[in-house]
Image (cartoon, rainbow, N blue to C red):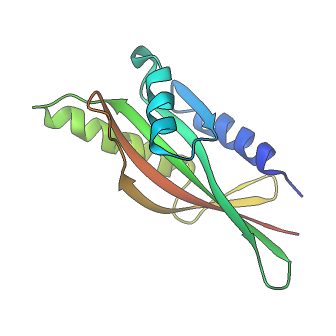
Amino acid sequence: MQTVKQTAEKLSVLLAQKFATVRVSALSNPEQFLHEIRAINPANLPGVIIVYDGGSFSDENTMRTERMTLIVLDRFRSGSDDRALELLANVDKVLELIPPEGVELDGVYVTPEDCNSCSNVADFAALAVGIVVRQGI
């Protein structure tokens, strides 16, 4: 069985194919989110922050399910449709790597779940792509 750490590492390698910066974070509150965003050099954007949300086991303990969020991050620029469309294109890059039908990473099956706006920092635009990670036990 693959550990959560191993899964995050494999996701990091996968996402690095399309993004200049990929970070793994244990953030769990808005203040930590602000610190993580500000720790990334804007010159190294767009980027992705992988955040662990939680996990569960099936009633029969035959399936382990983890939820993670991929925060797709770029600089915010007002008055430019092109820049807004670039952020949406970055979500499409995530979906190329983790398509709706899912992707298998060494016995772990990863599918996208949802996508939401998540930035509360004026200088950054961010979208959160929720993913579900499943593996048999």
Does residue 74 lie above or below 5 as drawn?
above
Tell me the quarter of the image containing the C terminus.
bottom right
* Residue 24: image location, x then y, percent: 63, 36
> In the shown orientation, is residue 136 left or right of residue 19?
right
Task: Tell me the quarter of the picture where residue 90 sits.
Answer: top left
The single residue placed furthest to the bottom in the displayed view is 60
> In the shown orientation, is residue 38 left or right of residue 57?
left
* Residue 111: image location, x then y, percent: 59, 62
The single residue placed furthest to the left in the displayed view is 79
| In-front residue for pair 51/93 | 51
Residue in view at x 42 percent, y 24 percent: 45
Task: Tell me the quarter of the picture where residue 110 sits.
Answer: bottom right
Does residue 137 lie above or below 36 as drawn?
below
> In the shown orientation, is residue 108 left or right of residue 25?
right
| In-front residue for pair 54/134 | 54
Residue in view at x 81 percent, y 58 percent: 107
* Residue 43: image location, x then y, percent: 41, 14
Q: Is residue 37 visible?
A: yes
Total residue callouts: 0
Residue in view at x 41 percent, y 35 percent: 73
| In-front residue for pair 37/64 | 37
Tell me the quarter of the image containing the N terminus.
bottom right
Task: Tell me the quarter of the picture where residue 61 sits.
Answer: bottom right
Residue in view at x 78 percent, y 44 percent: 5
Does residue 66 lie above or below 56 as drawn?
above
* Residue 26: image location, x then y, percent: 64, 41
Q: Is residue 66 visible?
A: no
